[in-house]
């Protein structure tokens, strides 16, 4: 009986689980306006310079020489094209 109750609670918990992320449409729109250009992005950990290759609702992709960086939009302090 305990196993049946435990399995039922586990199934119920899996159904109620939802993914939530903050979305800032103004930042995303501004980033999309400089897509394909070289940008400087200041994050809480420092700055990164490179070509803005992709913009998604939760992250951006920057190509710098032979490296690719994926930066969460929530971590961006400011950015500007150069």
Image (spheres, rainbow, N blue to C red):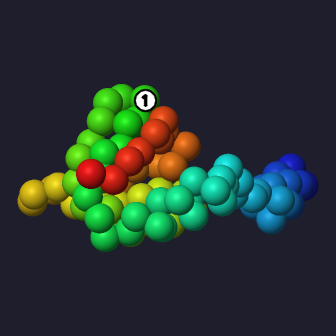
Which residue corresponds to the image point at 57% horizontal and 54% vertical from the top-left? 27
| Rendered location of residue 16, percent (x, y) | 83, 59
Residue nearer the viewer, 17 or 48: 48
Q: In this view, does 64 lie to the left or right of 53?
A: left
Q: Can residue 69 be seen in this view?
A: no
Q: Tally the numbered discs.
A: 1
Q: In this view, does 50 lie to the left or right of 78?
A: left
Give the quarter of the figure containing the N terminus.
Answer: bottom right
| Rendered location of residue 38, percent (x, y) | 26, 58
Residue nearer the viewer, 46 or 17: 46
Residue nearer the viewer, 69 or 7: 69
Q: Residue furthest left?
A: 66
Which residue corresponds to the image point at 31% horizontal and 70% vertical from the top-left? 36
Q: Which residue lies furthest to the top in this view?
A: 45
Q: Mark 1 points at which residue?
A: 44
- Note whether 25 is above or below 54 in the view shown: above
Q: How many neighbours does mark 1 have within 10 angstroms: few (below 14), some (14-19), or many (20 or more)?
A: few
Label 1 residue SS: loop
Quadrant position of residue 44: top left
| Rendered location of residue 70, percent (x, y) | 35, 54
Q: Is residue 17 left or right of residue 76?
A: right
Quadrant position of residue 41: top left
Which residue corresponds to the image point at 38% horizontal and 37% vertical from the top-left? 42
Which residue corresponds to the image point at 30% horizontal and 36% vertical from the top-left? 47
Q: Residue furthest front?
A: 82
Q: Can residue 54 be seen in this view?
A: yes
């Amino acid at each position: 009986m305990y196993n049946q109750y435990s399995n039922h609670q586990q199934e119920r918990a899996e159904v109620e689980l939802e993914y939530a992320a903050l979305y800032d449409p103004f930042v995303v729109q501004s980033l999309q306006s400089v897509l394909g250009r070289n940008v400087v992005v200041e994050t809480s950990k420092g700055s990164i310079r490179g070509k803005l290759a992709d913009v998604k609702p939760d992250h951006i992709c920057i190509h710098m020489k032979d490296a690719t960086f994926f930066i969460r939009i929530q971590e961006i302090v400011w950015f500007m094209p150069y």
